[in-house]
Image (cartoon, rainbow, N blue to C red):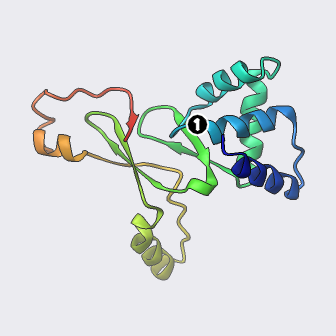
Amino acid sequence: MDSERLSLILTTLGREGRRITTGRRAVVEALVSAEGHVSADDLAASVSRSHPGVHRATVYRSLEALEAAGLVEHVHLGHGRSVYHLIDDLHQHLVCEVCGSVEEAPPELLSDVARRLRTERGFVMRPYHFAVLGRCSGCATDTPADHGGSGRHRPRAGRVT
């Protein structure tokens, strides 16, 4: 685990006037240790292994508090469960509608769109809450976009690449 990153996040949480409870600390530890995107259920299981006394409901409340403090972001990856990641790792999510793969893209991917929305409409976009749906390079070449595909690729649980 990256103890420096953990310390920085907990310090920021305290500076925001939020209590650093055992449950919140356990959730932050699980997020820092996680590889990629994790659901609330994944986090609850991880926290349960390292802190058996922390109840599942505490994990959910901790996620809400961390998100309210601006330290955690949740993302809807297509039709699946929401997943969570720390705000210090902002990125876009490209989700393949055919095979379910999830690719992380740099945060500036939609900066032109954000700039245009702000200039033309005064709208400030927060593009990290959602995924951009489409077809990954493998599925785009294997399946015609307008015919639903050749049947070679079937939707499956998302995987992060």
Q: How far across and how far down the image is residue 53, in percent?
A: 83, 18
**Image-based side of 118 in relation to 1, left or right:** left
Q: Residue at x 50, y 40 (%)?
A: 36
Q: Quadrant of the N terminus?
A: top right
Q: Residue at x 87, y 43 (%)?
A: 20
The mark tally for this picture is: 1
Front one among 130 and 8: 8
Question: Can residue 143 be seen in the rendering of this structure?
Answer: no
- Identify the image quadrant of residue 90: bottom right
**Image-based side of 117 in relation to 58, left or right:** left
Q: How far across and how far down the image is residue 30, in percent?
A: 67, 34
Q: SS at mark 1?
A: loop
Front one among 115 and 39: 39
Q: Residue at x 77, y 44 (%)?
A: 65
**Image-based side of 58 in relation to 21, left or right:** left
Q: How far across and how far down the image is residue 44, in percent?
A: 67, 25
- Identify the image quadrant of residue 96: top left
Q: Residue furthest bottom?
A: 119
Crowd rating for badge 1 (residues with CA inside 10 Å; few <14, some 14–19, many 20+) = some
Q: Given the image, on which type of amino acid does mark 1 rest?
A: Ala
Q: How far across and how far down the image is residue 100, in percent?
A: 33, 34
Report which residue position mark 1 lands on. 34
Q: Residue at x 71, y 26 (%)?
A: 47
| 151 versus 105 height, above or below | above
Question: Can residue 158 be seen in the rendering of this structure?
Answer: yes
Front one among 117 and 26: 26
**Image-based side of 101 in relation to 16, left or right:** left
Q: Quadrant of the C terminus?
A: top left
